[in-house]
Image (spheres, grey):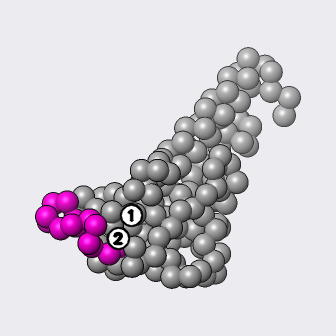
Amino acid sequence: MAYYPEETRMNAETYTVDSILHNKSHASVWSVTPSATVFDAIKMMADKNVGALLVMEGERLIGVMSERDYTRKVALKGKSSKQTPVRDIMPDRVISVTPQHSIQHCMKLMTENRIRHLPVLDGARVVGLVSIGDLVNWIISVQSSAISQMESYIMGGYSG
């Protein structure tokens, strides 16, 4: 094993969802009710420039609606987005993580379940939402930092 500084060996198992939530530039999580129309939900997604919305009943998370749900369950089936409620197209099961889950765990869940967004829950309370884009950006950032540290170490600039 090479003798690199400890920081360069950190990976997706080391960091948690909490590290992504703390570094997100915009922590807003947008939501709709299950009775909202799909049209209103899609409009909100466009206005907020997001790919998914949480579906909430009061403070309780009951689902996630994504652009993919709209495309596959409304547009391709010839339904009317102005008449179809969100509850009719959101997946039956909510897949979520806690702030303590690892980045690796999130990537595995997203890959296995073919989803792009994970609600983050602390108990029953929603504390955030992470997307596949958040994970990719985090990985790029950590790898870039590790490369810089290794370059500094190789050039003799690492002060340990």
In whole angstroms, how far apart are the C-alphas of marks 2 and 1? 5 Å
Which mark, residue 37? 2
* Secondary element at tag 2: loop
What's the residue at 72%, 42% (across, down)? Answer: 7
Residue named by callout 1: 40
What's the residue at 53%, 49% (across, down)? Answer: 134
Q: Is residue 108 visible?
A: no
Q: Is residue 73 left or right of residue 126?
A: left
**Mark 2 and mark 1 residues within 8 Å of each other at the beta carbon:** yes
The amino acid pointed to by label 2 is: Thr
What's the residue at 57%, 61% (across, down)? Answer: 29
Q: Is residue 85 left or right of residue 63?
A: left
Residue 28, quarter of the rendered image: bottom right
Question: For the magenta stretch, what is the residue range?
Answer: 73-86
**Foreground: 13 or 34?**
34
Disc 1 packing (10 Å; few <14; some 14–19; many ≥20): some
